[in-house]
Amino acid sequence: MNVFRIALNDIRIVLKDRMVIFWWLALPLIFTLIFGAILGDPTQDSTWIPVFKHDTHELADIFIDQLRAEDYQIDVKPISDEHWIDDWARAIIIPPTFSQDILEGKRTDITLTKGQGSPEKNLAAQTLLLRSLIKFNAAVAAIDLIQRDWSPETRQALLDELNTPALLSVETKAHFSLRPPPTGFARSLPQYLVMFVMMMTIMYGGLTLAEERAEKRLNRLVAAPVSIVEIFLGKLLGRMLQPILQGGFLLLAGVLLFDIKLGDHPVALIPVLLSFAFFCGAIGLLFGVLFHNEQQIMSIGIVTTMLLGALGGCWWPMEVVPQTFKTIALGLPSYWALHAIHDVMSFGQSWSGVLPECGILCAFGLVCIAIAIPRFTWH
Protein backbone atom coordinates (compact mmCIF):
# COMPACT_ATOMS: atom_id res chain seq x y z
CA MET A 1 0.00 0.00 0.00
CA ASN A 2 2.87 2.38 0.81
CA VAL A 3 4.28 1.77 -2.67
CA PHE A 4 1.09 3.05 -4.33
CA ARG A 5 0.86 6.04 -2.00
CA ILE A 6 4.40 7.09 -2.85
CA ALA A 7 3.78 6.58 -6.58
CA LEU A 8 0.51 8.54 -6.59
CA ASN A 9 2.10 11.37 -4.63
CA ASP A 10 4.93 11.60 -7.18
CA ILE A 11 2.58 11.69 -10.15
CA ARG A 12 0.43 14.27 -8.36
CA ILE A 13 3.48 16.53 -8.01
CA VAL A 14 4.17 16.21 -11.74
CA LEU A 15 0.57 16.95 -12.73
CA LYS A 16 0.57 20.12 -10.60
CA ASP A 17 3.01 21.68 -13.07
CA ARG A 18 0.97 23.89 -15.40
CA MET A 19 3.42 23.28 -18.24
CA VAL A 20 2.90 19.52 -18.19
CA ILE A 21 0.16 19.72 -20.84
CA PHE A 22 2.53 21.54 -23.16
CA TRP A 23 5.46 19.17 -22.63
CA TRP A 24 3.41 15.98 -22.51
CA LEU A 25 0.91 16.60 -25.30
CA ALA A 26 1.17 19.90 -27.18
CA LEU A 27 4.83 19.75 -28.17
CA PRO A 28 4.82 16.09 -29.34
CA LEU A 29 1.63 16.67 -31.32
CA ILE A 30 3.06 19.80 -32.93
CA PHE A 31 6.11 17.82 -34.07
CA THR A 32 3.82 15.01 -35.26
CA LEU A 33 1.70 17.46 -37.26
CA ILE A 34 4.63 19.29 -38.86
CA PHE A 35 6.77 16.32 -39.83
CA GLY A 36 3.78 14.08 -40.60
CA ALA A 37 2.55 16.68 -43.10
CA ILE A 38 6.01 17.30 -44.58
CA LEU A 39 6.76 13.61 -44.97
CA GLY A 40 3.14 12.78 -45.89
CA ASP A 41 2.07 9.51 -47.44
CA PRO A 42 2.95 9.49 -51.16
CA THR A 43 0.69 6.50 -51.70
CA GLN A 44 -2.30 8.64 -50.76
CA ASP A 45 -1.58 11.24 -53.48
CA SER A 46 -3.32 10.76 -56.80
CA THR A 47 -1.07 10.04 -59.78
CA TRP A 48 -1.22 12.95 -62.20
CA ILE A 49 -1.24 11.86 -65.84
CA PRO A 50 -1.45 14.54 -68.55
CA VAL A 51 -2.99 13.34 -71.81
CA PHE A 52 -2.46 14.86 -75.26
CA LYS A 53 -5.31 13.93 -77.60
CA HIS A 54 -4.40 14.46 -81.24
CA ASP A 55 -7.51 12.56 -82.36
CA THR A 56 -10.79 14.51 -82.43
CA HIS A 57 -12.99 11.44 -82.89
CA GLU A 58 -15.27 10.57 -79.97
CA LEU A 59 -13.76 7.08 -79.85
CA ALA A 60 -10.63 8.70 -78.40
CA ASP A 61 -12.78 10.41 -75.76
CA ILE A 62 -14.30 7.07 -74.79
CA PHE A 63 -10.85 5.57 -74.35
CA ILE A 64 -9.72 8.50 -72.18
CA ASP A 65 -12.78 7.98 -69.98
CA GLN A 66 -11.54 4.45 -69.33
CA LEU A 67 -8.33 5.91 -67.92
CA ARG A 68 -10.19 7.84 -65.26
CA ALA A 69 -10.02 5.82 -62.07
CA GLU A 70 -9.63 6.30 -58.35
CA ASP A 71 -6.20 7.65 -57.30
CA TYR A 72 -5.46 8.83 -60.87
CA GLN A 73 -5.81 12.41 -62.06
CA ILE A 74 -6.29 12.38 -65.83
CA ASP A 75 -5.61 15.85 -67.19
CA VAL A 76 -6.37 16.35 -70.91
CA LYS A 77 -3.98 19.07 -72.04
CA PRO A 78 -4.18 21.25 -75.16
CA ILE A 79 -1.75 20.31 -77.90
CA SER A 80 -0.03 23.67 -77.45
CA ASP A 81 1.31 22.48 -74.07
CA GLU A 82 3.11 19.51 -75.56
CA HIS A 83 6.43 21.38 -75.55
CA TRP A 84 6.42 20.98 -71.75
CA ILE A 85 6.37 17.21 -71.98
CA ASP A 86 10.09 16.81 -71.28
CA ASP A 87 9.65 18.59 -67.94
CA TRP A 88 6.84 16.32 -66.75
CA ALA A 89 7.21 13.00 -65.00
CA ARG A 90 4.88 11.23 -67.40
CA ALA A 91 2.36 11.81 -70.18
CA ILE A 92 0.12 9.84 -72.54
CA ILE A 93 -0.04 10.77 -76.23
CA ILE A 94 -2.95 9.57 -78.35
CA PRO A 95 -2.03 9.73 -82.07
CA PRO A 96 -4.18 11.49 -84.70
CA THR A 97 -5.11 8.21 -86.40
CA PHE A 98 -6.15 6.41 -83.19
CA SER A 99 -9.85 6.05 -84.00
CA GLN A 100 -9.39 5.62 -87.74
CA ASP A 101 -6.90 2.79 -87.29
CA ILE A 102 -9.20 0.98 -84.83
CA LEU A 103 -12.23 1.26 -87.09
CA GLU A 104 -10.16 -0.04 -90.02
CA GLY A 105 -8.73 -2.90 -87.98
CA LYS A 106 -5.18 -1.56 -88.04
CA ARG A 107 -2.57 -1.46 -85.30
CA THR A 108 -2.32 1.82 -83.42
CA ASP A 109 0.26 2.81 -80.83
CA ILE A 110 -0.29 4.98 -77.77
CA THR A 111 2.83 6.63 -76.32
CA LEU A 112 3.60 6.81 -72.60
CA THR A 113 6.49 9.15 -71.85
CA LYS A 114 8.50 8.87 -68.62
CA GLY A 115 10.57 11.62 -67.04
CA GLN A 116 12.37 12.02 -63.73
CA GLY A 117 9.32 11.54 -61.51
CA SER A 118 8.57 8.89 -58.92
CA PRO A 119 9.28 5.39 -60.31
CA GLU A 120 6.32 4.08 -58.33
CA LYS A 121 3.93 6.59 -59.92
CA ASN A 122 5.35 5.95 -63.39
CA LEU A 123 4.77 2.24 -62.86
CA ALA A 124 1.23 3.01 -61.69
CA ALA A 125 0.59 5.03 -64.86
CA GLN A 126 1.95 2.21 -67.02
CA THR A 127 -0.25 -0.31 -65.22
CA LEU A 128 -3.32 1.89 -65.66
CA LEU A 129 -2.66 2.30 -69.38
CA LEU A 130 -2.10 -1.42 -69.90
CA ARG A 131 -5.26 -2.30 -67.95
CA SER A 132 -7.32 0.22 -69.96
CA LEU A 133 -5.96 -1.06 -73.27
CA ILE A 134 -6.84 -4.65 -72.40
CA LYS A 135 -10.37 -3.69 -71.40
CA PHE A 136 -10.85 -1.45 -74.43
CA ASN A 137 -9.57 -4.06 -76.89
CA ALA A 138 -11.81 -6.69 -75.31
CA ALA A 139 -14.87 -4.44 -75.71
CA VAL A 140 -13.97 -3.62 -79.33
CA ALA A 141 -13.70 -7.35 -80.10
CA ALA A 142 -16.88 -8.23 -78.19
CA ILE A 143 -19.13 -5.94 -80.25
CA ASP A 144 -17.17 -6.65 -83.48
CA LEU A 145 -16.57 -2.93 -83.95
CA ILE A 146 -14.37 -3.39 -87.01
CA GLN A 147 -17.26 -4.90 -88.97
CA ARG A 148 -19.71 -2.16 -88.03
CA ASP A 149 -20.04 1.43 -89.10
CA TRP A 150 -19.60 4.03 -86.37
CA SER A 151 -23.04 5.24 -85.32
CA PRO A 152 -24.92 6.19 -82.14
CA GLU A 153 -25.99 2.56 -81.82
CA THR A 154 -22.41 1.33 -82.16
CA ARG A 155 -21.25 3.94 -79.66
CA GLN A 156 -23.87 2.83 -77.12
CA ALA A 157 -23.03 -0.84 -77.63
CA LEU A 158 -19.36 -0.09 -76.94
CA LEU A 159 -20.23 1.88 -73.79
CA ASP A 160 -22.50 -0.91 -72.56
CA GLU A 161 -19.75 -3.46 -73.08
CA LEU A 162 -17.19 -1.29 -71.30
CA ASN A 163 -19.55 -0.83 -68.34
CA THR A 164 -20.34 -4.53 -68.02
CA PRO A 165 -19.08 -5.83 -64.64
CA ALA A 166 -16.14 -8.18 -64.91
CA LEU A 167 -16.96 -11.86 -64.54
CA LEU A 168 -13.66 -12.50 -62.77
CA SER A 169 -12.23 -10.25 -60.08
CA VAL A 170 -9.26 -10.47 -57.74
CA GLU A 171 -9.71 -9.73 -54.05
CA THR A 172 -6.54 -8.49 -52.39
CA LYS A 173 -6.12 -9.14 -48.68
CA ALA A 174 -3.17 -7.50 -46.99
CA HIS A 175 -0.87 -9.52 -44.77
CA PHE A 176 1.19 -7.70 -42.16
CA SER A 177 4.44 -8.97 -43.66
CA LEU A 178 3.55 -7.41 -47.04
CA ARG A 179 2.41 -4.01 -45.80
CA PRO A 180 4.46 -0.98 -46.84
CA PRO A 181 6.40 0.96 -44.20
CA PRO A 182 4.33 3.59 -42.38
CA THR A 183 4.45 7.15 -43.66
CA GLY A 184 2.97 10.51 -42.72
CA PHE A 185 1.32 10.75 -39.33
CA ALA A 186 1.44 6.97 -38.90
CA ARG A 187 5.23 7.26 -38.88
CA SER A 188 5.71 10.57 -37.07
CA LEU A 189 3.42 9.91 -34.08
CA PRO A 190 5.26 6.77 -32.82
CA GLN A 191 8.60 8.48 -33.43
CA TYR A 192 7.83 11.52 -31.32
CA LEU A 193 5.90 9.50 -28.79
CA VAL A 194 9.02 7.46 -28.04
CA MET A 195 11.34 10.46 -27.99
CA PHE A 196 9.20 12.82 -25.91
CA VAL A 197 8.06 10.15 -23.46
CA MET A 198 11.70 9.31 -22.74
CA MET A 199 12.59 12.97 -22.45
CA MET A 200 9.72 13.92 -20.15
CA THR A 201 10.23 10.93 -17.86
CA ILE A 202 13.92 11.76 -17.50
CA MET A 203 13.15 15.44 -16.94
CA TYR A 204 10.29 15.13 -14.48
CA GLY A 205 11.41 11.83 -12.96
CA GLY A 206 14.97 12.96 -12.40
CA LEU A 207 14.18 16.51 -11.31
CA THR A 208 11.55 15.55 -8.73
CA LEU A 209 13.88 13.01 -7.12
CA ALA A 210 16.77 15.49 -7.06
CA GLU A 211 14.53 18.11 -5.47
CA GLU A 212 13.31 15.66 -2.83
CA ARG A 213 16.89 14.79 -1.98
CA ALA A 214 17.96 18.46 -1.85
CA GLU A 215 15.02 19.44 0.35
CA LYS A 216 15.55 16.46 2.69
CA ARG A 217 12.10 15.05 1.91
CA LEU A 218 13.65 11.66 1.24
CA ASN A 219 15.16 11.74 4.73
CA ARG A 220 11.75 12.35 6.25
CA LEU A 221 10.33 9.52 4.16
CA VAL A 222 13.05 7.17 5.42
CA ALA A 223 12.22 8.17 8.99
CA ALA A 224 8.59 7.15 8.42
CA PRO A 225 7.45 3.53 8.90
CA VAL A 226 8.32 2.69 5.29
CA SER A 227 11.06 0.33 4.15
CA ILE A 228 13.76 1.27 1.66
CA VAL A 229 12.37 -1.32 -0.74
CA GLU A 230 8.91 0.28 -0.61
CA ILE A 231 10.40 3.72 -1.19
CA PHE A 232 12.39 2.49 -4.19
CA LEU A 233 9.43 0.64 -5.72
CA GLY A 234 7.14 3.60 -5.09
CA LYS A 235 9.53 5.98 -6.83
CA LEU A 236 9.89 3.55 -9.73
CA LEU A 237 6.13 3.08 -10.07
CA GLY A 238 5.57 6.82 -9.94
CA ARG A 239 7.95 7.29 -12.83
CA MET A 240 6.26 4.47 -14.73
CA LEU A 241 2.88 6.16 -14.42
CA GLN A 242 4.21 9.19 -16.29
CA PRO A 243 4.97 7.41 -19.61
CA ILE A 244 1.82 5.31 -19.30
CA LEU A 245 -0.34 8.42 -19.04
CA GLN A 246 1.59 10.42 -21.61
CA GLY A 247 1.81 7.57 -24.10
CA GLY A 248 -1.86 6.72 -23.70
CA PHE A 249 -2.93 10.34 -24.23
CA LEU A 250 -0.72 10.69 -27.31
CA LEU A 251 -2.15 7.53 -28.88
CA LEU A 252 -5.68 8.73 -28.17
CA ALA A 253 -4.89 12.14 -29.64
CA GLY A 254 -3.42 10.45 -32.73
CA VAL A 255 -6.62 8.54 -33.31
CA LEU A 256 -8.88 11.57 -32.78
CA LEU A 257 -6.81 14.27 -34.47
CA PHE A 258 -4.93 12.43 -37.23
CA ASP A 259 -7.19 9.41 -37.80
CA ILE A 260 -4.28 7.06 -37.07
CA LYS A 261 -5.12 3.37 -36.94
CA LEU A 262 -3.90 1.35 -33.97
CA GLY A 263 -3.49 -1.84 -35.98
CA ASP A 264 -5.36 -5.12 -36.20
CA HIS A 265 -4.73 -5.88 -32.50
CA PRO A 266 -4.66 -2.56 -30.62
CA VAL A 267 -4.74 -4.40 -27.28
CA ALA A 268 -1.18 -5.52 -28.06
CA LEU A 269 -0.10 -1.93 -27.44
CA ILE A 270 -0.72 -2.47 -23.72
CA PRO A 271 2.31 -4.74 -23.06
CA VAL A 272 4.39 -2.53 -25.36
CA LEU A 273 3.44 0.61 -23.44
CA LEU A 274 3.96 -1.10 -20.07
CA SER A 275 7.42 -2.44 -20.94
CA PHE A 276 8.43 0.91 -22.42
CA ALA A 277 7.10 2.63 -19.28
CA PHE A 278 9.21 0.27 -17.16
CA PHE A 279 12.34 1.28 -19.04
CA CYS A 280 11.46 4.99 -18.92
CA GLY A 281 10.69 4.82 -15.22
CA ALA A 282 13.98 3.07 -14.56
CA ILE A 283 16.09 5.53 -16.53
CA GLY A 284 14.23 8.46 -14.96
CA LEU A 285 15.03 7.06 -11.52
CA LEU A 286 18.64 6.49 -12.58
CA PHE A 287 19.05 10.12 -13.61
CA GLY A 288 17.57 11.20 -10.31
CA VAL A 289 20.17 9.32 -8.29
CA LEU A 290 23.17 9.96 -10.55
CA PHE A 291 22.85 13.72 -10.89
CA HIS A 292 22.34 16.24 -8.16
CA ASN A 293 20.92 19.41 -9.70
CA GLU A 294 18.52 20.64 -12.35
CA GLN A 295 21.21 21.81 -14.75
CA GLN A 296 22.89 18.41 -14.88
CA ILE A 297 19.65 16.51 -15.36
CA MET A 298 18.32 18.91 -18.01
CA SER A 299 21.49 19.13 -20.10
CA ILE A 300 22.56 15.49 -19.91
CA GLY A 301 18.96 14.27 -20.17
CA ILE A 302 18.26 16.22 -23.35
CA VAL A 303 21.52 15.12 -24.98
CA THR A 304 20.84 11.49 -24.01
CA THR A 305 17.30 11.62 -25.37
CA MET A 306 18.41 13.26 -28.63
CA LEU A 307 21.06 10.59 -29.18
CA LEU A 308 18.69 7.74 -28.39
CA GLY A 309 16.05 9.28 -30.62
CA ALA A 310 18.33 9.97 -33.57
CA LEU A 311 20.16 6.65 -33.49
CA GLY A 312 17.00 4.69 -32.68
CA GLY A 313 14.98 5.86 -35.69
CA CYS A 314 12.90 8.67 -34.16
CA TRP A 315 14.34 11.33 -36.46
CA TRP A 316 14.48 9.47 -39.77
CA PRO A 317 13.59 6.02 -41.12
CA MET A 318 16.13 3.35 -40.33
CA GLU A 319 15.86 2.20 -43.95
CA VAL A 320 17.88 5.21 -45.13
CA VAL A 321 20.82 5.00 -42.71
CA PRO A 322 24.07 3.07 -43.35
CA GLN A 323 24.42 -0.47 -42.08
CA THR A 324 26.74 0.66 -39.27
CA PHE A 325 24.00 2.79 -37.72
CA LYS A 326 21.45 0.01 -38.19
CA THR A 327 23.72 -2.23 -36.14
CA ILE A 328 24.13 0.43 -33.46
CA ALA A 329 20.36 0.84 -33.27
CA LEU A 330 19.96 -2.79 -32.23
CA GLY A 331 21.60 -1.92 -28.92
CA LEU A 332 19.28 0.98 -28.11
CA PRO A 333 15.93 0.84 -26.24
CA SER A 334 14.48 3.61 -28.41
CA TYR A 335 14.83 1.39 -31.49
CA TRP A 336 13.03 -1.54 -29.87
CA ALA A 337 10.24 0.65 -28.48
CA LEU A 338 9.62 2.20 -31.89
CA HIS A 339 9.91 -1.19 -33.56
CA ALA A 340 7.30 -2.70 -31.22
CA ILE A 341 4.84 0.17 -31.71
CA HIS A 342 5.12 -0.04 -35.49
CA ASP A 343 4.75 -3.81 -35.36
CA VAL A 344 1.35 -3.39 -33.74
CA MET A 345 0.08 -0.22 -35.41
CA SER A 346 1.49 -0.61 -38.92
CA PHE A 347 2.08 -4.32 -39.45
CA GLY A 348 -0.84 -5.90 -37.59
CA GLN A 349 1.14 -7.89 -35.03
CA SER A 350 -0.63 -9.29 -31.96
CA TRP A 351 0.76 -9.36 -28.43
CA SER A 352 2.66 -12.59 -29.09
CA GLY A 353 4.51 -10.93 -31.97
CA VAL A 354 5.89 -8.12 -29.81
CA LEU A 355 6.93 -10.17 -26.78
CA PRO A 356 10.62 -10.18 -27.84
CA GLU A 357 10.67 -6.37 -28.05
CA CYS A 358 8.90 -6.12 -24.69
CA GLY A 359 11.45 -8.44 -23.13
CA ILE A 360 14.33 -6.38 -24.51
CA LEU A 361 12.83 -3.16 -23.14
CA CYS A 362 12.41 -4.76 -19.73
CA ALA A 363 16.04 -5.92 -19.87
CA PHE A 364 17.17 -2.34 -20.49
CA GLY A 365 15.04 -1.26 -17.53
CA LEU A 366 16.60 -3.88 -15.28
CA VAL A 367 20.09 -2.68 -16.21
CA CYS A 368 19.12 0.88 -15.21
CA ILE A 369 17.67 -0.39 -11.93
CA ALA A 370 20.79 -2.43 -11.18
CA ILE A 371 22.88 0.71 -11.58
CA ALA A 372 20.45 2.88 -9.61
CA ILE A 373 19.95 0.64 -6.55
CA PRO A 374 23.40 1.11 -4.95
CA ARG A 375 23.25 4.88 -5.40
CA PHE A 376 19.67 5.06 -4.15
CA THR A 377 20.36 3.10 -0.97
CA TRP A 378 23.52 5.14 -0.36
CA HIS A 379 21.55 8.39 -0.56
Image (spheres, rainbow, N blue to C red):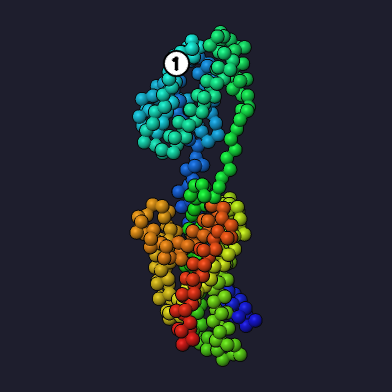
The extreme bottom residue here reads 223
Q: Could you say which is closer to the camera, residue 268 or residue 212?
A: 268
* Up/down of 343 relative to 103, above or below: below
Image point 57% across, 40% down: which residue? 172
The extreme right residue here reads 1
Q: Could you say which is closer to the camera, residue 290 or residue 18?
A: 290
Q: Position of residue 320 (x, y in %)?
A: 38, 52
Q: Position of residue 224 (x, y in %)?
A: 59, 90
Q: Position of residue 319 (x, y in %)?
A: 41, 52
- Please give the residue where the numbered disc 1 appears in the rendered image: 107
Q: Could you say which is closer to the camera, residue 322 or residue 80?
A: 322
Where is residue 241, by image quadrant?
Answer: bottom right
- The number of numbered discs placed on residues in the rendered structure image is 1
Packing grade of label 1 (10 A; few <14, some 14-19, many >=20) is few
Image point 39% across, 31% down: which residue? 114
Image point 50% across, 18% down: which residue? 60
Q: Is residue 74 visible?
A: no
Residue type at mark 1? Arg
What secondary structure is found at the residue carrying circle 1? loop
Image point 56% across, 45% down: which residue? 174
**328 sits to left or right of 205:** left
